[in-house]
Amino acid sequence: MAKVPLPERGQPLDVTYIYQLADTINDISTQVSSATYNYTTVDTVSAGKQSVKTSEARVIGGYIEVANNSTVNAGNEKTFTYDFPSDFKYAPIATATPVNIGNTPAGQNVVVILKSVTTSRVEGIVRFGASGDLSLAVHLIVVGIPN
């Protein structure tokens, strides 16, 4: 974006300077739009729907390795937690997806359940539906309003 030089005290304003001002204002106007698609809405438990500019929302993509070359039994569970780098104002919306990093049959039969989502962390469990060796991770997508 263009940066307009500040005029000297007593400097006459000429067409070039006014053109620079108008051009810079137009640049800012296109970069900061008030369109509705530039807003993020998060439906919170404690305060209902909260809308903020998308640039003011916080999105975290998390990765947690749950098992690395481990042997599991069908019906067993393993817990995991993921702490946020900084707190949210309200409990955010979180989504968890299992990733079969070992590409094994046992890694294809798992369920991820989020037990708790707070302003500072996500707690969940992975329930194994088959016995065998596996390497498994969980991807998290967390969207919320920063504190």
Image (cartoon, grey):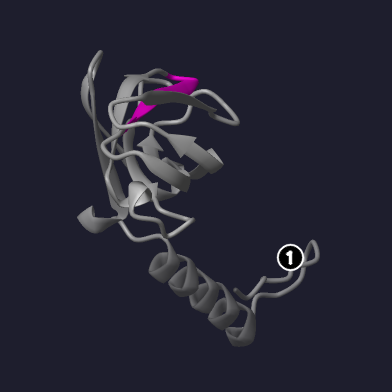
Image coords of residue 23 (percent x, y): 51, 78
Residue in the picture at 32% in, 19% down: 115
Name the residue located 37 percent from the left edge and 31 percent from the top edge.
Answer: 73
Question: Is 122 one of the magenta-colored residues?
Answer: yes
Nearer the observer, 104 or 51: 104
- Among the 4 quarters of the image, the one containing residue 49: top left
Residue at disc 1, secondary structure? loop
98 relative to 25, above or below = above
SS assignment for the magenta stretch, majority: strand
Q: Which residues are magenta?
A: 119-127
The image shows residue 76 at horizontal and vertical percentages of: 35, 25
Question: Does the stretch in magenta take in 90?
Answer: no
Give the image location of residue 137, x and y in percent.
47, 45
Q: Quadrant of residue 131?
A: top left
Query: Measured along the vertical axis of the image, is residue 137 above or below residue 121?
Result: below
Residue designated by label 1: 6
Residue at the extreme bottom of the image, as rendered: 16
Badge 1 density bin: few <14, some 14–19, many ≥20, Cα 10 Å: few
